Image: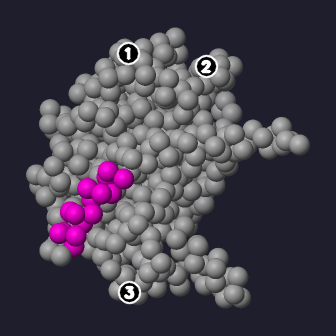
Amino acid sequence: MTESRDILIGIDAGTSVIKAVAFDLGGRQLASAAVRNTYETGADGAATQPLARTWADCATALRGLGEKIDHLPQRCAAISVTAQGDGTWLIDGAGTPVGDAWLWLDARAAPTVARVARGPAERARFEATGTGLNCCQQGAQLAHMDRHHGEMLDRAATALHCKDWLYFCLTGLRATDPSEASFTFGDFRTRTYSDTVIEALGLSHRRHLLPEIIEGTEVTLPLSEKAAAQTGLLAGTPVSLAYVDMVMTALGAGVHTGDAGAACSTVGSTGVHMRAVTADRVHLNAEGTGYVICLPSPGMVTQVQTNMAATLNLDWALELAGGIAEDFGLSLSHAELVARIDGWMARSAVGQLIYHPYISDAGERGPFVDAAARASLVGLSSAHRYADVVRAVIESLGMAARDCYGAMGAMPSELRLTGGAARSKALRAVLAGALDTPVRVSFREEAGAAGAAMMAAVAIGAYDTMEACVADWVTPLLGEAEIPDAGLVRAYASLFSTYQSSRRALAPVWHGLAQHRAGLSSTDRSGGSD
């Protein structure tokens, strides 16, 4: 008896976890499997990941999913893959990796970003891509490699992104999607490569490295025999190349449901703030920051601003408490510390301190780009206690979100929230108050994998349009609107202007500290002075 093909698989390959998630054709999540996906860092700002291991982990996740669902190979109607964005995954003519991938966390291209940003073609590049240049992006990384590691590019035949590499492993085709192609090397209006952009990056002589662009809601390729043997799935199963994980997560969580002014924030280790607009309604800010990322829907794009660190700041604050507890012989788990947050919030006053959430070693990229930016705590007095610091860190996530949405235009009329922090009532209240807008939580458990699977659903004809798919897969999973507290709205409106002016004033301090530390490091390498 032949099994009906009633399951879609969405692969979401994050920086640290690769997930394979099964959905029925109507969007109900059936099962998931995950594999940890580690990366390496270097003192020079490097953040790398072996390509072969990433594919092996992906194949392991797919086999793990097969162990949870009876007859998965026979029932799988299609597969779609999304993954961490930006970064550079090089392969040679035979498809063999050329070194390890440079991840979006890699900061080595910072000097090249500064050089290109000063160039006469930078504004034209920004207006084509809608995307501010930063060291996370493949364009900046290739430009840096071209100047400092030219031999790597000489050996390479194709420059892929993470999802493109996995798609190549699944199908054998070297390709990318319209989202990463246009915000890195192209024009979001035409969804094609742009000579202006490529020339502005100084990469015209490396253009042959860029793969063809395919639309995953229209094109599928068969799963190869080799990949089928490695994943346990059937050769010939249709495979769709999804868009980058940021936009897939937002799609799965509700950024595009037909409601004008709605937006979506993913508050996890990083913070991603997105609104869906037609391409002709994009607001390009004067500072030249943010992203414009195409949606898998005709004429629709997302405007994006991303914080390098969101809950990573809270993790730091909690680890600080945990470390002090250890010094006194106490052992508190991360979960136990998280459970105390509501108590700390209750024992602290609203809007008393300013914390700038730039804890990442790579600095900040939204709504401004500065690799030297670092976290700071402003306004401390002897009366403040640890609870006040925790509140300031949480309030900073609301301030950062407001900063980001302000760079994209007006505040959203409604915020859809996803990510681990969406479970925090305290954070939801802070975000609603900071943006003065209702917040709705998306109860989609695996939004990124769901967004990818939605593309496969349209590609195989299960839905005629993405909008029809959204109506079944997304809208029913949005929670009730949580209305902002009027007192918080007033307090955060007053706090925000000081938050914004102080972060601008601190820029010379960040750069002075960076020069100071570089000088200390140089002294250490030389053995110090007598």
In the image, residue 155 above or below residue 106: above
In the image, residue 235 above or below residue 476: above
Q: Amino acid at mark 3?
A: Arg
Q: Amino acid at mark 1?
A: Pro
**Quadrant where the C terminus is found in the figure:** top right
Q: Which mark is residue 347?
A: 3
Q: Is residue 191 visible?
A: no
- Label whose residue precedes the other's in the sequence (3 or 1): 1
Q: Position of residue 8 (x, y in %)?
A: 38, 56
Q: Which mark is residue 120?
A: 1
Q: Which mark is residue 147?
A: 2
Residue that appears at 43% across and 25% down: 117
- Report the Cα–Cα distance between label 2 and label 3: 54 Å
Residue that appears at 27% across and 63% down: 495
Magenta stretch in the rendered image: 488-502
Assess whether residue 443 is covered by the magenta stretch.
no
In the image, residue 419 above or below residue 306: below
Q: Position of residue 60 (x, y in %)?
A: 61, 57
Foreground label between 3 and 1? 3
* Disc 2 + disc 3, Cβ < 8 Å: no
Q: Amino acid at mark 2?
A: Arg
Q: Which mark is residue 106?
A: none
Residue that appears at 49% across and 16% down: 203
